[in-house]
Amino acid sequence: MDTLNFLMQGFAVALQPQNLMFALFGAFVGTLIGALPGLGPANGVAILIPLAFTLGLSADTAMILLTSVYAGAMYGGRISSILLNIPGDEPAMMTCLDGYPMAQKGKAAEALAISAIASFMGGLVGTFGLILLAPLLARFALTFGPAEYFALFVLAFATLGGITGKNPVKTIVAATLGIMISTVGIDISTGTQRYTFGMLKLYEGVDFILAIVGLFAISELLLFIEERAGAGRKLIKVGKLMLSPKEIVATLPTSMRGGVLGFIAGVLPGAGASLGSFISYTLEKQYLGKKGRFGEGDPRGVAAPEAGNNGASSGALVPMLTLGVPGSGTTAVLLAMLISLNITPGPLMFTQNADIVWGVIAALLIGNLVLLVLNIPLVGFFVKLLSVPPMYLLPVVTMVAFVGIYSISHSTFDLYFMVAFGIAGYLLRKLEIPLVPIILGLLLGPEMEKNLGHAMVLSDGDWSILWGSPLAAGLWILAALGLVLPYLVGPILRRRMRQSMTESQTSD
């Protein structure tokens, strides 16, 4: 009953005219960003963060805007997958398997409509899962002490690569870089300057908003210039929508199953939407067996991964809101936004900032409905966007990033710093070193250090306190498994994903 009351309060926040307007704007812009191949939700949210500061939005409005962008980008990723056979981001890869064959058969409009409905169902299932699970996990997290939180942060870093990660060693290198950057500034406990090189701007540490916009947005722009500047792409023509109610009903059970599996994958640390879409597609293919024509343009082959990755996007918010540990790259960016607004994510957020938490959850429910209504009639507009040469889009995105960052501090030093992070991000991406672990190290490093210090004070320097309680010991065991599993399960899973893609391409 308490949950229902909180949810009603959340709707009161989300339905305020200003918040509703920004939810609509975020959903629309997120879909545009998701439709552009390679950008993805993490980059989309990073690009929009400066805009939130430029407009001087309140904490609840800013979070509603960014979570709407997140949800919209998950929707938009399917457009380039179906029409170009180019995934908008990694989770949308599985949508190519049946979406593109449907488009080749002249059913592009049907594939886009089914993916929109499946995304809505997956997002709805995931949001209800968030409503039910998040308060329970938040109450459980209140029993955590500094030793348990330190072990939890170790678990977050250990599972960063996820079982779909390409190279766990590079993930560890990236996380170490992030933790090293987080130590820049004045040590709170001793007052000692660390790695400031006498620069006053570094006394308070590195601003993670600068790091995020530089590493994600600017580096993506540099890659865009290198790889995709020039002419737009030739698209498969989207015909008139001829989808019958019977065909929609036939995909609903698949969407429900995909949403549940995706939500579970999203909650698991380090798993995320990629695993959610892969498991949803693979298990649905096995469940239907000979009844399906997976890989040949089966509508259920579009519905399963789309429901899976949208369910996972809601699931990834559970550990971020309740424990302060991101469940995906995009939630790491959202975590940075919360911290920059002087809000500490974690179990106490559900009591101290209940309006923001439940406002965001209510906005997710509203956003999913808005996205369904927007996506089907406006699909022609989103499709035309893909044929626009990137050379016309790049200046707009660059302007938003630079103006937004400058409006926060009115400092040219920050602009130089952001560009430096952008160049570093570009080089790291060329070396295939992931950027999300760097951001997570930058965000969680100070809290990790603080909790380690508190634990040492409580135990009078006895290190055994870090694994002394059953809960802490369990978290350490999970962290060890998180380091080992990518080496055991990861290659198998990635090989199967490649096989699925290859089989689909050869059948074409």
Image (cartoon, rainbow, N blue to C red):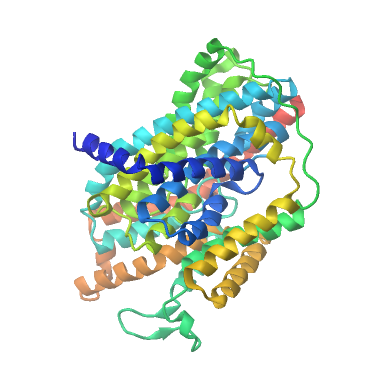
Where, by quadrant of the figure, is residue 219 drawn?
bottom right
- Residue 365 at what x, y percent from top left? 39, 35
**Which residue is at 40% across, 46% downward?**
18
- Image height check: is 40 above or below 108? below
Please, which residue is most extreme toward the front here? 17
- Residue 89 at what x, y percent from top left? 61, 43
Question: In which quadrant will I find the N terminus?
Answer: top left
- Residue 252 at what x, y percent from top left? 48, 19
**Which residue is at 70% across, 36% downward?**
384
Please, which residue is most extreme toward the bottom here? 198
Q: Count numbered badges in the picture.
A: 0
- Image height check: is 464 above or below 244? below
Taking depth in this image into account, of 262 and 243 the one nearest to the observer is 243
Taking depth in this image into account, of 184 and 119 the one nearest to the observer is 119
Question: In which quadrant will I find the C terminus?
Answer: top right
Please, which residue is most extreme toward the top here? 246
Taking depth in this image into account, of 50 and 492 the one nearest to the observer is 50
Residue 13 horizontal side relative to residue 207, left or right: left
- Residue 30 at what x, y percent from top left? 55, 44
**Which residue is at 53% across, 43% downward?**
489
Taking depth in this image into account, of 47 and 102 the one nearest to the observer is 47
Residue 80 is at least partly visible in this image: yes
Residue 444 horizontal side relative to residue 224, left or right: left
Residue 225 horizontal side relative to residue 313, left or right: right
**Which residue is at 25% across, 69% downward?**
455
Residue 261 is at least partly visible in this image: no
Where, by quadrant of the figure, is residue 126 drawn?
top left
